[in-house]
Amino acid sequence: MIIGIEAERANLADKTGVEHYAKQLILHFAEFDRQNQYVLYLRTPPQQWLLELPANFHLKVLPFPLFWTQLRLSWELWRHPVDALLIPASALPLVHPVNSVVVVHDTAWKYFSESFTWFMRNFLEWSTRFAVKRAARVIAVSASTKQDLLKFYGADPEKIAVVHHGYQLSGAAFGGAKEPREPLLPQRYILFLSTLQPRKNLIGLISAFRQLKRERPELPHRLVVVGKPGWKYEEILRTIEQNRDIVVYLNHVSEPRKAQILAKAEALVLPSFYEGFGMQVLEAFAAGVPVAVSNVSSLPEVAGDGAVYFDPRDAAQIKQAIQNILLDKGLADRLRENGRRRLAEFSWEKCAKQTLAVLSGIQQD
């Protein structure tokens, strides 16, 4: 079987969760599959790791200025068809094989439309509706996302497969040299790790943390924020600036540096109003860091008994969850142990094999 993969997201230098997902799928296909042929479609010159893939992986660089997926990739697929197409982190091309699989990571714009630009909201709505209608199969990264597709788009439940993200304990797949210790990193801190956008609720976390610091001034901790600006981030950056005495903003950092920062955190707090999956939870589990997360969308599904939960709209609950972890060593230790056990349920090899099974299944239908 010849499998085409839209790989431009995986090729980006500064990766967020979705881009890492695309890269890990490709890397793990390469580890165990020598039977199928893969064609990786890129818009920009490939990074070194792509050039080092096995001989059954072929790269096609297709430069194009605008609407690359819908125009240039469609043209390529029309001229040179493949047996199956996987879109791990983008939109289904207008021209595509009958056997096409699209991965949907979330439907956040349906819940928080004000958190997206007009263009992004409308593009995501159109591309998701198109994919649900035209793709042979849809992969949802959580049962929560699958339920959203059924609710908002009337999708056929038999058409949707739930395949969870994985996690790799070794950071070798990400590459990059070890970086020096950040001089601004405080000795003791809790961590927020996510792209800056309204639905991530960083403003609510800062408010809750400010309340905690007022009530418990003896706590030396600060809030470290790691994540690049996404969209509608201006108010978030202003709030960070207004709270510089308790907040340290590091913007985007490399994967090796992120692992270093996470390992020294005393808690990871993810106060999102909505998450399609929540990869940061698995990263914290792997680092042995206690986790506090919102009790919404996919987060309970992913975190299980490895986290304490709070209502993301209730600052008092967020504050209490943080305080409990910082002051109750027994609780923190239980969360670490539960997180380690929970992590064993997720692997990129499992994710890749289940994804390949979906691709192989549509060939046999």
Image (tube, helix red, strand yellow):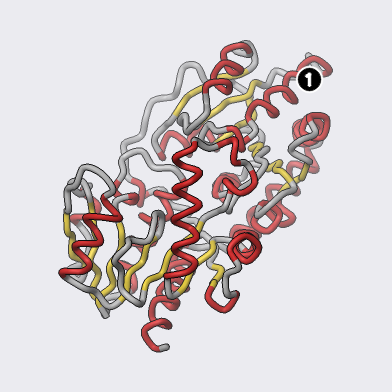
Secondary structure of the residue carrying tag 1 is: helix
- 177 horizontally vs 216: left or right: left
Between 166 and 94, the one nearer to me in the picture: 94
Image coordinates for residue 137, horizontal then vertical, percent = 46, 73
- 318 horizontally vs 94: left or right: right
Vertical order, 333 against 24 (above or below) = above
Image coordinates for residue 221, horizontal then vertical, percent = 68, 21
The residue identified by callout 1 is 211
- 69 horizontally vs 16: left or right: left
Between 301 and 230, the one nearer to me in the picture: 230
Q: Does residue 246 appear in the picture of this structure?
A: yes
Image coordinates for residue 287, horizontal then vertical, percent = 56, 44
Between 310 and 167, the one nearer to me in the picture: 310
Instruction: Report the quarter where the N terminus lies.
Output: bottom left
Image coordinates for residue 174, horizontal then vertical, percent = 36, 47
Between 99 and 172, the one nearer to me in the picture: 99
Residue pictured at 75% horizontal, 25% vertical? 208
Residue pictured at 63% horizontal, 26% vertical? 189
Residue pictured at 52% horizontal, 55% vertical? 105
Q: Quadrant of residue 304?
A: bottom right
Residue pictured at 25% horizontal, 61% vertical? 74
Disc 1 crowd rating (10 Å Cα; few below 14, some 14-19, many 20+) is: some
- Residue type at mark 1? Gln
Instruction: Report the quarter where the C terminus lies.
Output: bottom left
Q: Quadrant of residue 220?
A: top right
